[in-house]
Image: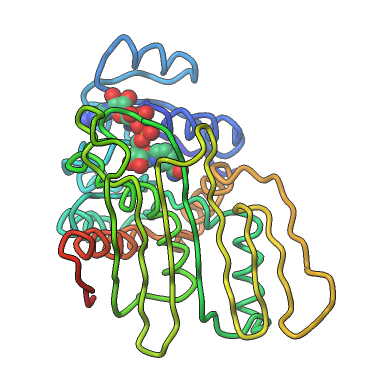
Amino acid sequence: MTARLAVALLGCGGIGARHADAVAKLPAVMHLVACCGREIEKTAAFAARYGAKPFVDFDRMLEMTQPDLLIVALPPFAHQGQVEAAARAGVNLLVEKPIALTMERAEAQVAAARDVVASCGFMYRHGAATRAWDAASARGESGTAGHFSAQFHSNALHAPWWRERDKAGGQMVEQLIHLIDLARHTLGMPQTVYARAANLYHRDVERYDTEDVSAIILGYDDGRIGVLHASNAAVPGKWAKQWQVVARRMTGQFTDWNNADFFATGSQAAPLKIRDERDVFVAQLGDLAEAIRLRRPPLVPLADGAASLKIALAARQSADERREIAL
Ligand SMILES: NC(=O)c1ccc[n+]([C@@H]2O[C@H](COP(=O)([O-])OP(=O)(O)OC[C@H]3O[C@@H](n4cnc5c(N)ncnc54)[C@H](O)[C@@H]3O)[C@@H](O)[C@H]2O)c1
């Protein structure tokens, strides 16, 4: 029998808890041994919920526990070489998006992690509907995807760091990046990025200096198009995240990562309905565990975190400079 993977967690906030819960749902495969936060009391309380050992010193956690897998759930601004240090110590990685706020740091992480199994937390890619589309595409059923459109509309103040562009990157970099990643995964890397963005509704909220409305066009020299839009001023408590792929022989309308209708182009037949309730955080960890065991690449390599960040940063630059950016 293979030994269970020892998992350590860096960052014990909202998504850190989501990952810890997901680890607990795979007791035969992995277990949480340690977690690292900034405040000892809060971290100890968090660790106690999962039977893990609390740390406030990341290097000490690595040294003392030598985990098989480190989940990095830090806010973007807090990335200061921890991913690189863990990779150099031979620790496999799951790094939350956005993996960094600059391409320099993102590329340094990818380079440092070349000899470990390293994944980016784009969990939309693990959904049943997303995987079904990928499978149909791989079988040649969909034909070439020519148009990808997506939206991400919320209305929440989020954590204080989230509102500050220097700390979080802005809504395009911090949230819409999930859908930018799906666009890139579906259509490939665009040749150009054009975006508009503004803070329309939160100028009087202290330290809220990021955009709350945005739109992005991804351009491809052969004519294919990606279009994404977002806001943080829509229906409070609702997170409207839908997307559509129009391909030569098939159109996929996704209401979320587990649910979609696939329509065959030119046919009146009822669509293929994908309906599923899988926990994508558990699926993500299951994939990683298998990748570590078989030494195969994970479904979402860390390099995808860098590639999609490149598009998000180009969108931000485009909006700032009001011009199209060539990648
Ligand atoms: N995959 C998703 O859908 C999803 C959802 C939410 C957040 N995220 C991402 O996860 C990351 C964290 O977001 P969150 O919502 O959990 O934030 P959060 O503010 O709820 O939690 C972040 C935690 O990290 C801790 N922290 C900050 N600096 C630290 C340091 N140097 N060492 C140890 N701990 C430190 C904070 O004290 C806090 O507990 C962000 O990059 C965010 O984009 C992803």
Task: Estimate the x, y position of residue 105 in percent, counting from the top left.
Answer: 17, 53
Q: How is the image coloured?
A: rainbow
Position of residue 127 in the picture relative to residue 285 (left or right): right
Above or below: residue 9 compared with residue 165 = above
Residue sitting farthest toward the right: 269
Q: Quarter-wise, where is residue 156 in the image?
A: top left
Is residue 218 visible from the viewing direction of this image? yes
Count of labels in the image:
0
Q: Quadrant location of ligand 1?
A: top left
Position of residue 161 in the picture relative to residue 32 (left or right): left
Quarter of the figure that contains the N terminus: top right
Give the residue displayed 29% in from the left and 61% down from the top. 196
Position of residue 204 in the picture relative to residue 247 (left or right): left
Residue sitting farthest toward the bottom: 222
Quarter of the figure that contains the C terminus: bottom left
Viewer-proximal residue among 93 and 6: 93
Give the residue displayed 52% in from the left and 57% down from the top. 125
Task: Estimate the x, y position of residue 287 in percent, counting from the top left.
Answer: 54, 53
Above or below: residue 167 compared with residue 300 = above
Give the residue displayed 24% in from the left and 21% down from the top. 38
Is residue 72 visible from the viewing direction of this image? no
Give the residue displayed 56% in from the left and 84% down from the top. 144
Task: Estimate the x, y position of residue 195 in percent, counting from the top left.
Answer: 29, 64
Viewer-proximal residue among 46 and 223: 223
Above or below: residue 262 compared with residue 46 = below
Position of residue 125 in the picture relative to residue 311 (left or right): right
Viewer-proximal residue among 30 and 321: 321
Residue sitting farthest toward the top: 41
